C-alpha cells in the first residue's frame, strides 16, 4: 500500500453498527485495502450516547467538538487535537456534548472482522 492522504470526504459515513442514534462512522482504510489497521472518521450529532464493549484496541482523535468517554466509573473528556485510547474488552459509554463531534479513529485489528467473529 502506498502513502495516501485521507479526508472525511473520502469516508462513506453510515450509522454505527448496533445503535439507532445520530452517530455515523466510515472507514477509509480497512482489510479491503490490505492495511493492518482500520482507519476512519466518525460524526456524532449533539447530545448522543453510545454504549459498547470495545472489540479491538481503539484510538479516537477528536477533530471538532467534544466527547466524554466513561469506563470503570471514571470519565475522560476530549476536545479538538486530543486522543482517547479505549483498550480491547473495555465497556465504555461515549457521549457527545451540545456541539456534537467529528473524530478520526484507528483500530487494531480491523473492527469489522472482530465484530463478525463476535457474532
Image: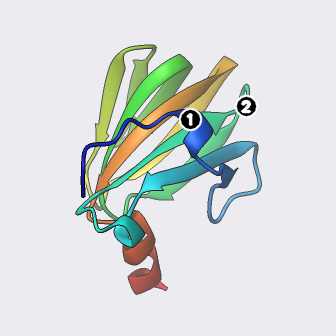
Horizontal side, residue 66 vs residue 13: left or right? left
Total residue callouts? 2
Q: Position of residue 75 (x, y in %)?
A: 40, 27
- Image quarter of the N terminus: bottom left
Q: Earlier in the sequence, mark 2 or mark 1?
A: 1
74, 48: nearer the viewer: 48
Q: CA distance from mark 2 to mark 1?
A: 15 Å
* Local secondary structure at mark 2: loop
Q: Residue at x 25, y 43 (%)?
A: 3
Q: Residue at x 49, y 27 (%)?
A: 68
Q: Residues within 10 Å of mark 2 (few under 14, many from 20)?
A: some
Q: Position of residue 12 (x, y in %)?
A: 64, 51
Q: Position of residue 79 (x, y in %)?
A: 45, 14
Query: Which residue is the site of mark 2?
Result: 45
What is the quadrant of residue 36 in the picture? bottom left
Query: Which residue is the site of mark 1?
Result: 8
5, 15: nearer the viewer: 5
* Local secondary structure at mark 1: helix
Q: Residue at x 46, y 46 (%)?
A: 40
Q: Is residue 25 above or below residue 61?
A: below
Q: Is residue 8 above or below residue 19?
A: above
Closer to the eye: label 2 or 1:
1
Horizontal side, residue 90 vs residue 28: left or right? left
Mark 2 in CB contact with mark 1 (< 8 angstroms): no
What is the quadrant of residue 54 in the picture? bottom left
Q: Residues within 10 Å of mark 1 (few under 14, many from 20)?
A: some
What is the quadrant of residue 77 in the picture? top left
Q: Is residue 6 above or below residue 107?
A: above
Horizontal side, residue 96 vs residue 36: left or right? right
Q: Residue at x 63, y 56 (%)?
A: 16
107, 89: nearer the viewer: 107
Amino acid at each position: 500500500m502506498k502513502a495516501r492522504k485521507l479526508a472525511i470526504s473520502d469516508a462513506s459515513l453510515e450509522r454505527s453498527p448496533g445503535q439507532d442514534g445520530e452517530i455515523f462512522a466510515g472507514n477509509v482504510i480497512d482489510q479491503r485495502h490490505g492495511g493492518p489497521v482500520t482507519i476512519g472518521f466518525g460524526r456524532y450529532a449533539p447530545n448522543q450516547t453510545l454504549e459498547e464493549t470495545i472489540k479491538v484496541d481503539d484510538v479516537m482523535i477528536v477533530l471538532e467538538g467534544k466527547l466524554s468517554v466513561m469506563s470503570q466509573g471514571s470519565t475522560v473528556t476530549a476536545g479538538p487535537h486530543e486522543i482517547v485510547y479505549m483498550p480491547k474488552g473495555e465497556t465504555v459509554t461515549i457521549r457527545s456534548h451540545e456541539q456534537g463531534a467529528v473524530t478520526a479513529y484507528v483500530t487494531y485489528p480491523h473492527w469489522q472482522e472482530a465484530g463478525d467473529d463476535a457474532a
